[in-house]
Amino acid sequence: MNDVDVVVIGAGAAGLAAAKTLRADGRSVVLLEAMDRIGGRAWTTSEHFGVPFDIGCAWLHAADRNPFLTEAQAANWTLYHHDMNVDHLYYGRRKATEEEEAAMKRADGELARLLESHDSADDRLSSLLAKGHAVRAAATFSGPMDFGKDDDEISIADFRAAADLDPNYFTKEGFGALVARFGADVPVTLSTPVRSIRWDVPGVAVETERGTVRARAAIVTASPAVLAYEEIRFDPVLPPEYEEAFFDLPMGMLTKIPVEIRGTRLGLSPFDDLLIERHARHDIFFLCFPFDLDLMVGFVGGDFAWEMSVAGEAAGIDFVTDRLCGIFGNDVRNHVGRAMMTNWGAERWVRGAYAAARPGKARAREVLTRAVADRIWFAGEHLAGSLIQTCGGARLSGEAAARDVIATLR
């Protein structure tokens, strides 16, 4: 492997964006990817249902600030503005009353006010919910379905720093396909995990099973979980605050369980949002028949999503089917076709959905925005400022890191 100006590790949105920015400035770049494809957590496949389905990120969040939106429009991608409001709310098998649905909407506003006025040392989101946010349905969206964590594991400071992600768009052709299109012109060395990064030499020496890349700088876009598990070793070890930051940004989990429903729409409209609240936080959200496809896409988040990952795909599909039968009747089983379950926790080079700071540890993100000895930079959705946990934010983070590297190398 040849010596270059910069080695970029990870070919997700952040890594692809970093490489494109560096190459546009005339810098020589090697982009290394552990998996056998580009895109990272943006991955569209037609394998399961014969139509594009996003195994990973699907919504173009914060579309007015998301650079992928204009590219989707230029490519004539089919887009739908999704308002993310709950159209159908159930408590167990019981449909919520109009009063209960109104109470949920009021609770959203109440949480926003509590976040603005929060000044306690208790940084757990659950402390706000206990104080006055009594409706669990709203809490489900604030925690497992939003941050991929239960509310007692979410930092208020971290949650408050995240932007309102409206407007949100959904794309029929697939967000993962859009990211792959974005990175199609970037040379990538696939199936090449990085084993270690030496930074006690001039620049850096990045070691892989295929050889060593020497560069003036490195941009690392691996998830904090991959770094916390020491899949990539640093020699010498990084300063303690960096290792602590990896640990303090654990990955949350959001799992999709799409089920094909043929021959009926269950009285629902395309893109309806259906939320079923259950005991033990075994809640489930459905995106109903997007683009009028024969799919009910179930989502479970937080600790329950990790539990479902361990139980396995068959258990997940049974859970979704049982919930639909509980509301719409057992005849639903006669309409169930193909189904699958995503499992990002089992992906060695990701280990979860996206990062969420532990309570009291929101500063971890700021630590990782600082370069190590002007040789190693970090980028990704976990370092995307107010657009954390989004693919668009990851791209912007990669571009920002590349600009910092360019300014330092001059």
Image (cartoon, grey):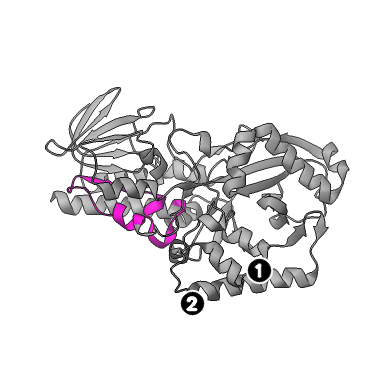
Q: Which residue is drawn at 55% across and 68% down?
A: 128
* Quadrant for the N terminus in the image: top left
Q: In which quarter of the image is residue 55?
A: top right
Q: Is residue 317 left or right of residue 142?
A: right
Amino acid residing under circle 2: Ser
Extreme top residue here? 210
Q: Which of marks 1 and 2 is nearer the N terminus?
A: 2
Q: Mark 2 points at which residue?
A: 117
* SS label for mark 1: loop
Q: Residue at x 15, y 48 (%)?
A: 409
In depth, the one of 193 and 63 nearer the eye is: 193
In depth, the one of 385 and 272 nearer the eye is: 385
Kindly indicate whether the residue at mark 2 contacts the one at mark 1 (C-beta within 8 angstroms).
Answer: no
* In magenta stretch: residue 369: yes
* In magenta stretch: residue 373: yes
Amino acid residing under circle 1: Ala
Q: Mark 1 points at which residue?
A: 134
Q: Magenta segment, which residues?
A: 364-391
Q: Which residue is drawn at 41% across and 42% down?
A: 225
- State the image coordinates of residue 286 (x, y, percent, origin top left): 69, 51
Res. 291 visible in picture: no
Counting other residues with Cα less than 10 Å from the Cα at mark 1, is it few (<14), some (14-19), or many (20 or more)?
A: some
Q: How many marks?
A: 2
In depth, the one of 362 and 30 nearer the eye is: 362
Q: Is residue 201 left or right of residue 287?
A: left
Q: In this view, does 339 lie to the left or right of 67?
A: right
- State the image coordinates of residue 304 (x, y, percent, origin top left): 62, 46
Q: Residue at x 72, y 53 (%)?
A: 279
